[in-house]
Image (cartoon, coloured by chain):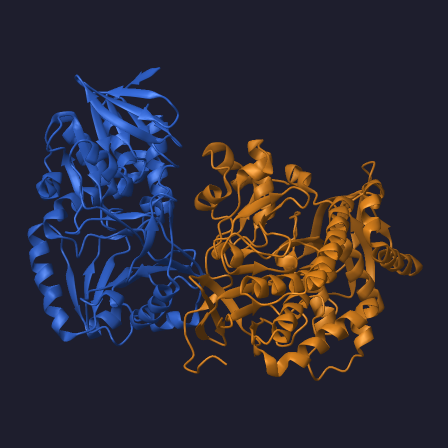
Chain colours: A orange, B blue
Amino acid sequence: MVDPRVVVVGAGPAGVRASEILAAAGLRPTVIDEARRCGGQIYRQQPENFVRAIDTLYGTETAKARSVHAAFEALRDRIQYRAETFAWNVVDGQLHVESGGAKAALPFDALIIASGATDRVMPVPGWTLPGVYSLGAAQIAVKAHACSIGRNVAFMGTGPLLYLVAYQYVKAGANVAAILDTSTIAERLAALPALTARLDNVFKGLSYLRHLRGRHIPIFNGVTPVEISGADGKGVTSVSALRRGGRRLEIKCDAIGLGYHLRAETQLADLARCAFKFDLSSRQWLPEIDEDGRTSSKGIYLAGDGAQILGADGAEIRGRLAAYAVLRDFGHAVPDDTVALLRRQLHRIERFSRGLARAFPWPSKLVEALPDDTVICRCETIRAGELRGSARLKGAWEVNRAKAFSRVGMGRCQGRYCGHAAAEVLAASAGVPIEEVGRLRSQAPVKPLSIATSDGAIR
Amino acid sequence: MKRAADILIVGGGIMGSSAAFFLQRRGRSVTLLERGLVGQQASGTNFGNVRRQGRFLPQLPLANRSRQIWGRLGELIGEDAEFLMTGHIRVCYGKDQIGTLETYATKAREYGLELELLSQNALRDRFPFIGPEAVAGSYSPHDGHANPRLAAPAFAYAARREGAVVRENVEVLHIEKSGEDFRVETSRGEVFQAPVVLVAAGAWANRLSAEFGEPVPLVARGPQMAVTEPARYEIKPVLGVSTKIAEEGVYLRQIPRGNVIFGGGNRGPAFTDSKRAYVLPENTLSQMRQIQRIVPALGSLRVIRVWSGIESYLPDDIPIMGPSGRVSGLYYAFGFCGHGFQLGPGVGDVMAELIDTGATTTPIEPFSISRFA
């Protein structure tokens, strides 16, 4: 049998581990990645000429980061690696990529999509002010650029990343004004049985918390965000929220990291016509996959947070499983006991991740109280009131219909950032369950595609 | 349970919706059945051209009548669907094509469409964003563009306000004539009865016309559309290319919020069963090359989204419109071959006149379904 042509999208923990297994089987996968260096978002590397020590960057995760980077470096002459390349479409066995304006189509027999995740954002009045960053962006600033997003930073939202990024800022010497978490202690306690699936992670989280408390960083649980305030020419000046019991809280700050856990980057899977299902635990649409990452589309495999939000360790496992699935489907021998072990590890991580979703729930109810003039879709400046109007007056509460009438999700980000909140606004306004408002259909390009094509052949 | 109306319209695209509106205005009761949502397919996903120049000449009276309505949308249906009379320019790249533009302009004048021919210098003086490859242009000052996502729903909602029954997510499964009336069965298990039926079901119309012994060689294809990120609003007129080469035949328009919308060239696959149509990446890449020949500055922009929809085409590239050749009380308006958006309001007005009075003052004989009998 001729070896299959395999393309791996993404060089984060999932993509690296998938490539490692494929290369070990003697295949020569093509690995494309948007970043300049491997590692993905979680193990993002600083530029070559930056000199911070690796354990400053990755803290407790240093060993894992080092291992992923080293594994990829060891592969370099056994794979075809295209850095700074992004996949903008996938059609009929070809992945369409662009790098520096040059465009190419890569034919494949098997495609492993390890496209990762981005922040999930819940709008709040003032969230489009200069100085408001997603938690992920705040993390990129400190990890890759060695910058803080402000002199006095507040973090608001929920999820493990809220505490991790705050911890990283404190470690880097930034002044953290406060942490405002929409989830409650009671929710976290209720999730404990599931979270015991990974006690090591629970302890890690508690150690971040201890460190933050040790620095006297105020932490507020169960808050209801009210607004982010700003001044002309100055950007953010404060954030206010209601504490449990209704007392108003105002935190002075000049920058905010905002985020509510993560959302899977699923556009490539959608363009590859994979079937999706609504995942109630995380309240998002995810591609349907089997336990090894096979989708409903032949030759398309998913791994990492782009398939299901499991975090970096889950991504490494899913990357390996997807590679073994490819090998098995193309007639290669696969070590069954290794696969069985990986699946068992995966189940434990899945249980933990359901626990996280319960401990730090997406606060969907917040959309009900959003004022009509709050921007939901910032690319097109579509406000909550316009969406509610489209749902009520025109009966357009299905999300693609609302997009057609109101332009929500039509801009540069294609609904990647506003889509979840927009769906919640529509569902709340029409009084229907969230899954009934449907899912924004992905359209190419996955990210904006330059019209001018450079003459040089793609590297 | 049977529901009765004077006229039953199958299909809530811009043809069916505007026909419903104009029939209600004439005091006739209409029930419109739409299998999905109004204006969702060809009517909602096209380029949004409100263009007359370049059309099949005998279609110009219909296009002129439609253009009159476009200018009065606000007063008629309460919203303008973002219609802008920006003018429309067809450029050409070869000297040999200039003659084609000149001949068309001369003949169009006989139909009341005044076109202005512009030399290369005049073109670039008045529209400096046009590239040096364009050697001449034909300018139609009263044409323009509108938002296709809004137009058909606006007609449907206006028809509803006038008293029409507009039902979405109701598919017509079967139509038969029993006695004086048509009997229409739907996916909801309802039966409708009406003495007149208008089939305006786009790419899905052939199944119904075939039931009455009038099958047509209808083919479903998808337009290949794209939109850029916003840029300063500079390109006021709609721009297109007069050419015999399919790839060169692209068109573009900029909307006041700044985005540039483009399409044209080769078409893509469309599937009536799954109700999906796709943009082929090679078509987008080809369009990106071609639009820079018209406006070189577009090279500095980025495409943020592509889309398609389901259009229906006939081999002679003109639509089916008018009464059935076999069954009295049965009318058709479908198969607009990718150029129906501008015609939509006029088609609705003409079909309403035809159904209401038995005749129309606008010639539509070339579009009779009998040409395929």
Residue B195 horizontal side relative to residue B267, left or right? left
Left or right: where A421 falls relative to A159: left
- Residue at x 56%, y 72% (from the top left corner): A32
In this rendered view, identify the residue nearer to me: B24 or A336.
Answer: A336
Camera-nearest residue between A183 and A103? A103
Q: Quadrant of residue A314?
A: bottom right
Residue A61 x, y percent position in the rendering: 80, 68
Kindly tell me whether residue B91 is visible in this rendering: yes
Image: B28 above or below B85: above
Measuring 39% from the left and 61% from the top, which residue is drawn there? B233
Residue A273 vs B334, above or below: the answer is below
Q: Position of residue A332 (x, y in %)?
A: 58, 67
* Residue drawn at the location 17% of the way across and 74% of the way down: B94
Toward the right, the furthest residue is: A214
**Residue B279 found in image quarter:** bottom left
Residue sitting nearer the eye, B112 or B16: B16
Q: Residue B72: tell me if it is visible.
A: no
Above or below, A181 against B165 in this view is below
Q: Image quadrant of residue B335?
A: top left
In front here: B72 or A199?
Answer: A199
Q: How many marks?
A: 0
Left or right of B243 in this view: A3: right
Most distant residue in the top direction: B1
Residue A68, position as x, y percentages in the image:
72, 72
A327 sits to left or right of B354? right
Q: Residue at x 50, y 32 (%)?
A: A392
Q: Residue B177 appears at what percent x and percent y?
A: 19, 22
